[in-house]
Amino acid sequence: MKSLFKLIILMVVLISFASCQNKSRPNYQYFPDMYYPVGYETYSEVEFLPYDMEAKLPAKGTVSRGHIPFDIDGTLEGYDLAKATLISPLDSTQIDSPRGGQLYDIYCAVCHGKKGDGQGILVQREKILGVPAFNDAGRALTPGSIYHTIYYGKNVMGSYANQLDEEERWQVVDYVMQLKAELGGSQTVKD
């Protein structure tokens, strides 16, 4: 009789647990904010920013992570300044010509040609006209002028500052100077 009574009590407890469970809503949650986050729309009005601001400006003097500011501006005077004064910070052990050649082939050869003769695939297909060779006498290329042009762009050529970091830009500059020397252009510029 005692075992039957224990069995009945066990059945009542199990039935009560089963009947109290409601599958239409979740069970008790300790941290409901982890399950139901508050979603903010980008650039929408929010209560915690003053004066109906949508986003705060960064503090003055801050620089994005991984970005190294370039102190010479993108004007013609900045180009002349870079052409005259800017030199590569890479020493001979840091220059990697095969890597510079790969980067040149990816970003530059389509217009300037594999040899720097201004006969890239876009020039051959007449999509872009008038790309001069690196050894043209009127160009007077220097490492500083090449770096400035890669950073800011010039004429029809756009900027490649977002595609190439500083070290990669200097690798391309070194490779362009090698192509200029191979085409018969002088390495130094006489003023």
Image (cartoon, rainbow, N blue to C red):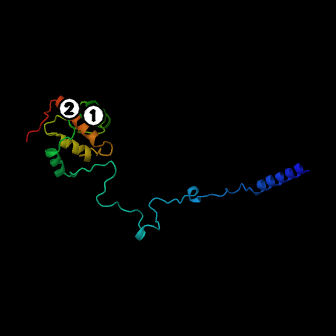
User: How many labels were placed on the picture?
Assistant: 2
Q: Amino acid at mark 2?
A: Gln
Q: Crowding at label 2, few (<14), some or many (≥20) Cα neighbours within 10 Å?
A: some
Q: Considering only vertical position in the picture, is 70 above or below 107?
A: below
Q: State the residue at coordinates (41%, 66%).
A: 53
Q: Crowding at label 1, few (<14), some or many (≥20) Cα neighbours within 10 Å?
A: many
The mark found on residue 21 in the picture is none
Mark 2 residue element? helix
Q: As drawn, which residue projects farthest toward the left? A: 191
Q: Position of residue 135 (x, y in %)?
A: 16, 34
Q: Residue 126 is drawn in which quadrant?
A: top left
Mark 1 residue element? helix
Q: As drawn, which residue projects farthest toward the right? A: 1
Q: Considering only vertical position in the picture, is 148 above or below 116?
A: below
Q: State the residue at coordinates (18%, 43%).
A: 144
Residue annotated with mark 2: 178
Residue annotated with mark 1: 100
Q: State the residue at coordinates (22%, 51%).
A: 71
Q: Amino acid at mark 1?
A: Gly
Whether residue 120 is visible to the viewer of this picture, yes or no, is no
Q: Position of residue 57 (x, y in %)?
A: 35, 62
Q: Position of residue 129 (x, y in %)?
A: 25, 39
Residues under labels 1 and 2: Cα distance? 10 Å
- N-terminal-most mark, 1 or 2: 1
Q: As drawn, which residue projects farthest toward the front? A: 2
Contact between labelled residues 2 and 1, with CB atoms less than 8 Å apart: yes
Q: State the residue at coordinates (25%, 43%).
A: 150
Q: Nearer the viewer, residue 100 or 60?
A: 60
Whether residue 178 is visible to the viewer of this picture, yes or no, is yes
Name the image quarter holding the C terminus: top left
Q: Position of residue 105 (x, y in %)?
A: 30, 33
State left or right for residue 2 relative to residue 182.
right
